[in-house]
Image (cartoon, rainbow, N blue to C red):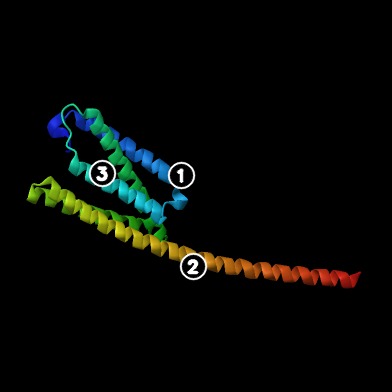
Amino acid sequence: MYGTDTLGCFIVGYMMVSFGTGNLVAILAMDKLKPCSSHPLFLSLGFLLNIGVLILTSLWKPTGIESSELLLYTAFWGLADGTLQAQSQAIVTRYARDEKDTAMTGFRVCQGLGLIASFFTSIFTQNLMTSLYAALVLHVIGFLGLILVANEVASRDRQGTGEVNEDSRAQSETDHCGTEVGIDNEAQIT
């Protein structure tokens, strides 16, 4: 694990807590921002946070005295991961409204295949930079797929909103016409 070779194995538990805390903060924040979580700007934010983590991983190697910086980095990593996970889940479940469980299972399988590919790349090349490049390429492919799905969801929502607006407009015209007829009939009675 990143950082354990210089700081020792004792730091792993603290790193897990730090990652989990960042992840939880991101998920809670994204829950509050759920209506706009599928907007391309917010999707780009999650993507850029994860790209920042990958770039920081490639540029910074922790030393023995940087344990607090490593924990902050791990919290940032958890924040980036939680943001992207919450956004992905929101979009995938909106895309497949009737088959939410199947859609999430398929999403997790694709995510697992990406992790396996990145893991095998790091084992066979035994080079952190090659593994990070593979993770970056897989991340870009996943982001582009997520943007395509988000655009499909947005176009479906726009079509659904247009149909609802036409139905409500027709209903209000019917109500309005009925009201006018009622007024005319009432005027004729008096």
CB under 8 Å between discs 1 and 2: no
C-alpha span from label 3 to label 2? 37 Å
Quadrant location of the N terminus in the rendered image: top left
Secondary structure type for disc 1: helix
Residue pictured at 53% horizontal, 67% vertical: 162
Residue pictured at 18% horizontal, 26% vertical: 65
Q: Amino acid at mark 2?
A: Gln
**In the depicted view, which residue is nearer to us: 99 or 15?**
15
Residue pictured at 25% horizontal, 31% vertical: 69
Residue that carries the numbered disc 2 in the rendered image = 159
**In the depicted view, which residue is nearer to us: 57 or 182?**
57
Residue that carries the numbered disc 1 in the rendered image = 32
How far across and how far down the image is residue 135, in percent? Answer: 20, 51
Q: Residues within 10 Å of mark 1 (few under 14, many from 20)?
A: few
Secondary structure type for disc 2: helix
How far across and how far down the image is residue 167, in percent? Answer: 59, 69
Q: Amino acid at mark 3?
A: Val
| Up/down of 140 relative to 23, above or below | below
